[in-house]
Amino acid sequence: MSRKYIFAAVADHHDAKLWLELADPFDANLRTWAMNRVKKPFAFCVPSDLMAFLALHESAHQALTQISVEGTTATAADTGVEITLTTLAADVHPVIGLVNSSLYDALKARASDIHIESTATGLVIKYRIDGVLQETVSAPGIETAEQMLSCLKVMADLDIGERCIPQGGRFKALINQREIDFRVSIMPSIHGEDAVLRVLDKQRGEAGASALRLDSIGHDPEIVEIIRAIAREPYGLLLVTGPTGSGKSTTLYAMLTEINTGDEKITTIEDPVEYELAGVLQIPINDKKGLTFARRLRSILRHDPDKILVGEIRDGETAGIAVQATFTGHLVLTSVHANNVFSVLDRFLHMGVDMHSFVDALLGAVAQRLMRKNCPHCVRDDTPPDDATLRASGLTRDQVAGCEQCRRTGYLGRQPIAEVLRLNDAIKQCFVERRLIMELKQLAYDSGFISLRQIALRAFADGRTTLAEVNRITMVEA
């Protein structure tokens, strides 16, 4: 114990790790002093852990179990930081309080991501709600920004002294008795570092939560029936495409839930496992240990699966194995990044997959987006009134810009919209012969294909969304 710098070094005999517990781990001078004096590898702990260690006089392992963070190497039985209104009120350090309250508020606001941006004067915290970034709070002081980023690094088990290269990790938090995973990305910027936290709620697919089904997550009935018909096929390849954050994983999980009757072996390969599904073997990948999508996919083919979900096709090797798996009698569900259902062929050809094999294996493709819905608690015109109309009406801009329920955006919640291309012999022949896209689209429309734009315009026509939202997520058709 050092009286001058107030720190304690604790060795964990179970994993041979050295923990350095500092009275103030956010003090830059103290961190520098510690890194210069301690020659062995170590990790910082937060102030409350030091006080708990000194007060309880327990073994080093017991002290470590009180640490309110869970890094990437922790076991599933461990618990992360517990956040409730009571613990928020008890937070002594203002930076820890800011971090915990940000996590709490983000979950309450249904945010999918938390953006923490360093500026020239401090930091800005934004939430991505319903697909759109919204600024929530700003905090002055460059030191505050540095301390908050350091705190997040501690929680995600990252290198607190490294500020020049990107880092990634994850941690868990128990928020109102609900276990939430946070995936952390740290990126250097001109004003220091920025952080983005992806909010992953694994409990969504567990018992007691609302069942993940294609109709319950919001797909139109007509689209649900087409997807279900494809997913009931005994073997073949079903693709779900769309940009990041478009709900691809949720749709894939909903498909699995519906086809999981218990009569067949269902195995998934994911990065990360986002929702836990009962009766399904879910396998995470680990790039650091060489356990990639391709390697995992090869190994599970020897594990006698019937249905396989591959979280994402990222390279030609994984794509080739997925296609070959369909020829040995497996149904493969997966996602790939493409703008629409007609461009999936080019994506696979770019990855070096044989065109004839791919077209032969492909059952269908689903391209989807998430569309914001009109807030049911307020009424907002699609075209906001100008300032002159507001003055004549005796109103302010805030009074007509939504309500508290929708954070004055006019939108509350999202629903998926999707276009589905189910392949038949004519469409497959068109793909193989690489005909013009206009011919392919005409064949699709003749077979009953409905485009994303048409689905979105239907939602506008029946009052579920605005024309501005339709134009934001879909392109005008030529």
Image (tube, grey):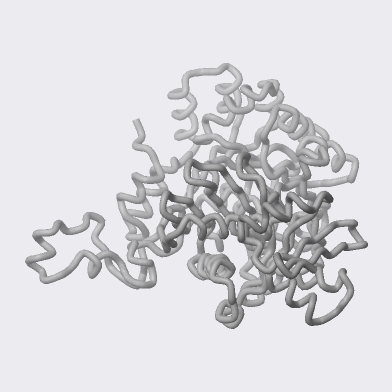
The N terminus lies in quadrant: bottom right
Determine whether 223 is above or below 438 in the image. below
Q: Position of residue 304 (x, y in %)?
A: 88, 45
Q: How many marks?
A: 0
Judged left or right of residue 136, residue 102 is: right
Quarter of the view holding residue 250: bottom right
What residue is at 87 percent from the left and 70 percent from the top?
A: 60
In the displayed orientation, state which residue is furthest to the left: 392
Judged left or right of residue 4, residue 223 is: left
Q: Nearer the viewer, residue 416 or 34?
A: 34
Q: Position of residue 340 (x, y in %)?
A: 50, 36
- Asked whether residue 274 is in view, the answer is no
Q: Position of residue 223 (x, y in %)?
A: 52, 50
Judged left or right of residue 304, residue 159 is: left
Q: Position of residue 25 (x, y in %)?
A: 66, 62
Determine whether 431 is above or below 183 in the image. above
What residue is at 42 percent from the left and 60 percent from the top?
A: 140
The C terminus lies in quadrant: top left
Quarter of the view holding residue 384: bottom left
Q: Nearer the viewer, residue 307 or 80?
A: 80
Q: Nearer the viewer, residue 435 or 209?
A: 209
In the displayed orientation, state which residue is furthest to the front: 4
- Asked whether residue 271 is in view, the answer is yes
Q: Nearer the viewer, residue 309 or 442?
A: 309
Determine whether 407 is above or below 323 in the image. below
Judged left or right of residue 390, residue 110 is: right
Quarter of the view holding residue 463: bottom left
Determine whether 83 is above or below 70 in the image. below
What residue is at 84 percent from the left and 36 percent from the top?
A: 298
